[in-house]
Image: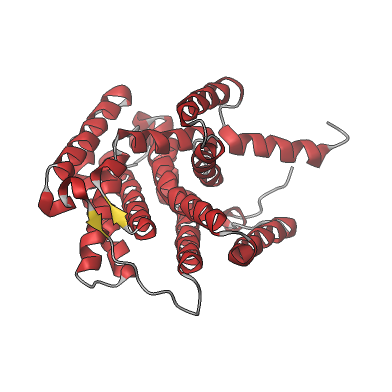
Amino acid sequence: MDLVESYKDEMRLIDKPWKGFWIGLLLMALLLLPWLGDEYMIYMVSLVCIYSIGVQGQNILIGYTGQISLGQAGFLAIGAFTLGHLSRLGVPVLLGLLGAGLAAGLFGLVVGFPCLRLKGPYLAIATLGFGIAVYEVFVNSQTLSGGRMGLIVPKFSPLFGLSGSAFYYYFSLLIGVVFTLVSFNIISSYIGRAFIAIRDNDIAAEAIGVNLTFYKLLSFVVSSFYTGVQGGLYGLLMGYVEPNMFTFLESVTLFIAVIIGGLASVEGSIMGAAFVILVPHIFSSYKELVPVAFGISILLVLIFEPLGLYGRWLKIRLYFRNWPFR
């Protein structure tokens, strides 16, 4: 077993040369994808990058802090429509994404404050009500969402001579990598340790000096910010947003990604995002089987692999590391 000599060593993202090699190889493959893959593959990987941001935010809330939310579709809608309106006003796209995240984060603060004393199914139901309320507001407001006709999100011009799909892919990949690094830093910091302490035992956490009110609200705000940015990026990719894109099923999709990818795992969040994007693609000819595939996958994960896809990946790595002395 490897010994950690200092806290600085424990904080390192790449602690082994071979790990850096594989991460570099993966990034190289992702950078070369637009030159080697077709348009549909580029679109699918762009979706995975976008969804991984929201799943990481959901995992910070559920996996690391232990707060269950089924209202993420509401934050998605707020982020998407905020970006849409800001883009139509001529706001630069990066500032628009920041505005989308801040708007969703503000509503996360508003929702999180009255839910501080709620746990488990009560918290889930409260956040579910928020998601449904946001959907009803947007679907019935011509001013906010264009009503049932939706809202056109202006596309920005590609740079560096890239095609539109390749430029959006690189942009989504860059934002996804940035948020992944931020997630690792949050979880490795004092904030992340406070989140985990609250999840494991909030009474004990409060006894050792963790401010429950502050960190629970912070978890809601961070998760909502991530989801708002996801909604903004999704609107940019599609070029169009309308309320029916953000129904309760979107909240369920993010929740499924967290469970299947692996609770309390940034890497698992990315795997979960890939799962919920690729499964509908695999069953594209039999769409009625997608919910069945999701349900069976959740049952298999809960019964045989509670740590999700990332937990299985860790066991595979451990198996080959110890081979043949297993």
Colouring method of the image: secondary structure
User: As rendered, which of 104 and 235 lies closer to the eye?
Assistant: 235
The percent coordinates of residue 141 (x first, y second) are 11, 47
Residue 207 in view, yes or no: no
Query: Residue 237 occupies which quadrant of the picture?
Result: bottom left
Give the answer, above or below, for where 241 lies relative to 296: below
Q: Residue lying furthest right in this view? A: 324
Q: Residue at x 66, y 54 (%)?
A: 5
- Vertical placement of 51 versus 159: above or below? above
Residue under the image location 79 percent in, 42 percent down: 321
Depth check: give the residue in front, 272 or 159: 159
Quarter of the rendering occupied by the C terminus: top right
Can you give x and y, in whole percent of width and height, for residue 43 in the image?
50, 55
- Does 242 sit left or right of 264 as displayed? left
Q: In the picture, which quadrant includes the N terminus?
A: top right
* Near-viewer residue (155 or 199): 155
Q: Going 46% across and 61% down the picture, which residue do you hit? A: 172
The residue positioned farthest toward the front in the image shown: 285
x, y percentage for residue 34?
58, 65
Specify whether 116 is left or right of 195. left
